[in-house]
Image (cartoon, helix red, strand yellow):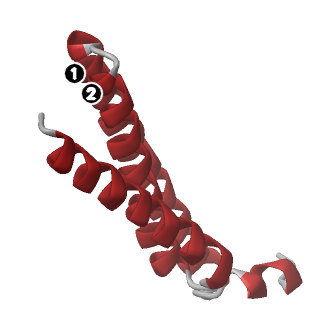
């Protein structure tokens, strides 16, 4: 991998992670929070894959990508499940309004 391609790949991964962190701090609805989490995990995955590739861990890089994709899929399923529970029990979309609700 050439230096220019690697630099662009690392910069794109960091930008994804920054957008994900910004979304986690500013967004109030659960669906947008889910998108922010996906951006954050994708950015972290890209950064970790770049680091593993740059230090020469080619086989570890494949395993790392597989593990991170499994974690990402599990996280996505749990957040969608939480969204369905919120909608069914509380009938709200806003995360901040959950703190004021009583069952």
Residue 87 position, x and y percent, is 54, 80
Q: Looking at the rendering, which quadrant does residue 55 occupy?
A: top left
Taking 86 as reference, is 27 above or below it? Answer: below
Residue 98 located left or right of residue 46: right
Taking 43 as reference, is 20 above or below it? Answer: below
**Element type at mark 2:** helix
Nearest to the observer: residue 23 or residue 83:
23
> Is residue 88 in view?
no
Instruction: Identify the disc placed on residue 62.
Output: 1
How many angstroms separate mark 2 from mark 1 (CA)?
A: 6 Å
Instruction: Identify the disc placed on residue 1.
Output: none
Residue 24 located left or right of residue 20: right
Residue 53 position, x and y percent, is 27, 25
Residue 14 position, x and y percent, is 43, 57
Taking 103 as reference, is 28 above or below it? Answer: below
Nearest to the observer: residue 45 or residue 99:
45
Nearest to the observer: residue 59 or residue 28:
59
Q: Find the residue positioned furthest to the front.
A: 3
Determine whether label 2 and label 1 are within 8 Å by CB.
Answer: yes
Taking 88 as reference, is 73 above or below it? Answer: above
Picture quarter with the N terminus: top left
Residue 97 position, x and y percent, is 76, 88
> Is residue 67 in view?
yes
Q: Residue at x 39, y 42 (%)?
A: 47
Label 1: few (<14), some or many (≥20) within 10 Å? few
Picture quarter with the C terminus: bottom right
**Element type at mark 1:** helix
Q: Residue at x 46, y 48 (%)?
A: 75
Instruction: Identify the disc placed on residue 66.
Output: 2
Q: Residue at x 57, y 84 (%)?
A: 29
Label 2: few (<14), some or many (≥20) within 10 Å? few
């Amino acid at each position: 991998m050439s230096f220019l391609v690697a630099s662009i790949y690392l910069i794109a991964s960091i930008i994804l992670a920054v957008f994900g962190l910004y979304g986690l701090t500013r967004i109030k609805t659960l669906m947008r929070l889910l998108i922010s989490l996906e951006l954050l995990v994708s950015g972290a995955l890209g950064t970790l894959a770049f680091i593993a590739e740059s230090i020469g861990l080619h086989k570890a890089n494949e395993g790392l990508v597989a593990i991170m994709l499994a974690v990402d899929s599990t996280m996505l399923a749990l957040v969608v499940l939480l969204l369905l529970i919120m909608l069914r029990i509380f009938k709200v979309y806003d995360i901040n309004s959950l703190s004021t609700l009583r069952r």
